[in-house]
Image (tube, helix red, strand yellow):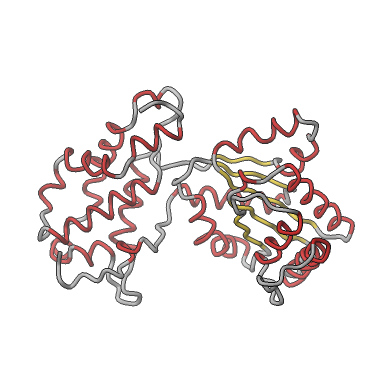
Amino acid sequence: MNQNINFNHPIFTQKYTIYTPPMDEMIAVIGDWIEQRLSGGYLYGPSRFGKTRTVRDYLIGELSQRFKHEIPLVLWSRKESLMSEGEFWNEILKSTNYEFYDIKKPKTKMIARNLVEERFKTIADFAYSNYVIILIDEAQEMTLKEWKWLLGLQNNLDLSGYKISVFSIATHNVNYKPNYLARTGNPHIAARFFTGDYRFKGIKTLQEIAFILRSYEEDSEWPVGSGTTYLEYFAPIGYKKGNRLINYAELIWDGFQKSYPQKAYKKNQFEIPMQHLALLIEKTLKDLANDGEDWGKLESLDYWLDLIKKTGFESHISMITEIPI
């Protein structure tokens, strides 16, 4: 390893996010829902595709640029454990950044619920609007009771002259939720919170791979303010000579296609989870730094097939498409 390499680099810590075409599409969908003032919508897709990173790192900033003002949006990541109604309202209250919230002294059920309602009104007022959005991540954990509690909140806000949209993000199994709610006598909840739907996609084209590779070699930077891209940091000699990862986009594309479980083609369109592509690129950058920038081995399809295998790509695709490996 090059002695000048700093292990605090984002490639080692994995504390970075690359903007991708699927992220852009998802944000555009949410923006359209906001313009339409949908009462609710759900976004779903398998794990490791980049849904949470989209919300955490880009959503609010991109929407603010689109609408030219701050968006009255509350982000709440639901815990996996079951919650009482008091815990439910306290968790949402905490997500609104309520300044008087004390995690050691949670509010009673009714106080927390009333404070949530007032907080949403305040957030809307601050944005010079009567409208607010709550976006629930990990929404596959939501229970029927919780949807009913949100329905009551939405109704109360409506009576006060305020509108709230409830958008949820979940793994692909939430796709069955509207049908389940309708079958169990709760079609009004499905109609309210599942008006819009969108499936978050993986990387599906060679062009998208090229776009992402270009981000690692052009649009990334570390240390902050240095102007040094990730590729330049790990392979400065080759970078100076004009070597670029994008030159291997077709080999990477071929490698993922050859590694895709054949049985999965019958159930799914081919797509690559962003996490596996990121792991592949991270390992390549480390390899270049480790071996004195041996760019020649990147010309081999076998090199990419080996790295793809090490990311666990095949087993993950088999798992999310529910087929035996």
Q: Position of residue 242 (x, y in %)?
A: 17, 59
Q: Is residue 54 left or right of residue 66?
A: left
Instruction: Note whether 312 is above or below 84 in the view shown.
Output: above
Identify the residue shown where x is 35% and y is 46%.
276
Identify the residue shown where x is 42% and y is 52%.
20
Q: Residue 111: name its quadrant.
A: bottom right
Instruction: Note whether 15 is above or below 193 in the view shown.
Output: below
Q: Position of residue 6 (x, y in %)?
A: 24, 71
Residue sitting nearer the eye, 278 or 138: 138
Q: Position of residue 70 (x, y in %)?
A: 64, 68
Identify the residue shown where x is 23% and y is 67%.
233
Say which quadrant the C terminus sits in: top left
Residue sitting nearer the eye, 222 or 169: 169
Q: Is residue 289 left or right of residue 121?
A: left
Say which quadrant the N terminus sits in: bottom left
Number of numbered discs visible in the structure rendering: 0
Q: Residue 7: name its quadrant.
A: bottom left
Q: Position of residue 141 (x, y in %)?
A: 62, 45
**Which residue is most to the front?**
104
